Image (cartoon, rainbow, N blue to C red):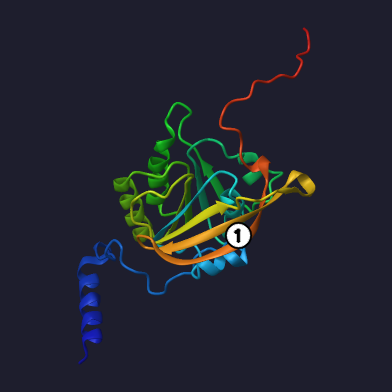
Amino acid sequence: MSAAPDLSLLRTALETRFGGAIVPLPGQAPERARPGFRTGIAAVDALLPGGVARRELTLWTGQATSGRTAALRLLVEGACRQALVALVDATRTLDAASWCGPAGRSAPGLWIARPPASAPADEGAWVAEALLRTGAFALVVLDGPAPEPVEAHRLRALARETDCALLVNASGAAPQWKADARLEFVRAAAARPGLATGARFRRPSGVRAARGWGARAGERQVELVHEPPHRLHPHSVPDRRPRARP
């Protein structure tokens, strides 16, 4: 008798005796790998053949107005048509109403979570961890400062255990910890953004991809649409509208 039937009989015998106590080991790969999530931007998806993959930590970095938010919006819109998506707004600068409100274009199934107003932005890693532990979401996005190496390792392990796709979308330089895939968005130095309809700016950007610790996987040029209403100013703006007298 081959090893496979032997293991099958052994598992059957154990389940008969111990019932529900027999569960798959944490981190065990599913029988069939489920597909990841794509942005719908051909140049970006070409750099991530499997999309933002499940059971992996994908890192997006880049300077402000480099197109990361535009690409993120397209990724989230596509993903929440297929499954439940959680977006952690660690810096409290995303305009939640335009992402998932009644007037927004996103499909149902998008949850936006924020740390308390009094908490620092790096508490976003704790929020992302809590969402991953529920096992309810197919894609969890941490938008904000890159987590510390220990936090990133823990989040990556949880993504593997829960068969979840995890994306960290951080500004600035790439952190020095392991990510399964990395994308760096770079605004073109000589770009002169043109104003399109609906107060949208078309901005040329470069996108560089790497695997693992930084092995270059490719580079593409892409034109991304920057939509200011999707992100709020990081500082509060006073209400200057005239008030009605009593």
| 129, above or below 50, in the image | above
Q: Tell me: 187 left or right of 9.
A: right
Q: Amino acid at mark 1?
A: Gly
> Where's residue 159, x and y in %?
38, 57
Is residue 26 among the parts visible in the rendering?
yes
Residue extending farthest front:
190
- Vertical placement of residue 152 versus 165, above or below: above
Q: Which quadrant is home to the N terminus?
A: bottom left
| The furthest residue to the bottom | 1
Which residue is rendered at x = 63% and y = 24% of the image?
A: 237
| Above or below, comparing residue 111 to residue 6 in the picture | above
Which residue appears farthest toward the top when viewing the image? 246
Taking 153 as reference, is 83 left or right?
A: right
Q: Is residue 244 left or right of residue 215?
A: right
Task: Kindly identify the residue that appears in the image at 43 percent across and 63 percent down.
Answer: 210
How would you rate the neighbour count of disc 1 (Cα within 10 Å): few for under 14, some for 14-19, many for 20 or more?
some
Residue 235 spot, x, y in % from top left: 57, 28
Total numbered circles: 1
Q: Position of residue 100 (x, y in %)?
A: 63, 46
Callout 1: helix, strand or loop? Answer: helix
Q: Nearer the viewer, residue 48 or 20?
A: 48
In which quadrant is the C terminus drawn? Answer: top right
Horizontal relation, residue 15 to residue 42: left or right: left
Instruction: Please state the horizontal and vertical placement of residue 200, each as a whole percent of the image.
Output: 73, 47
Residue 147 in the image: above or below residue 44: above
The answer to whether one can see residue 100 in this image is no
Pointer 1: what residue? 78
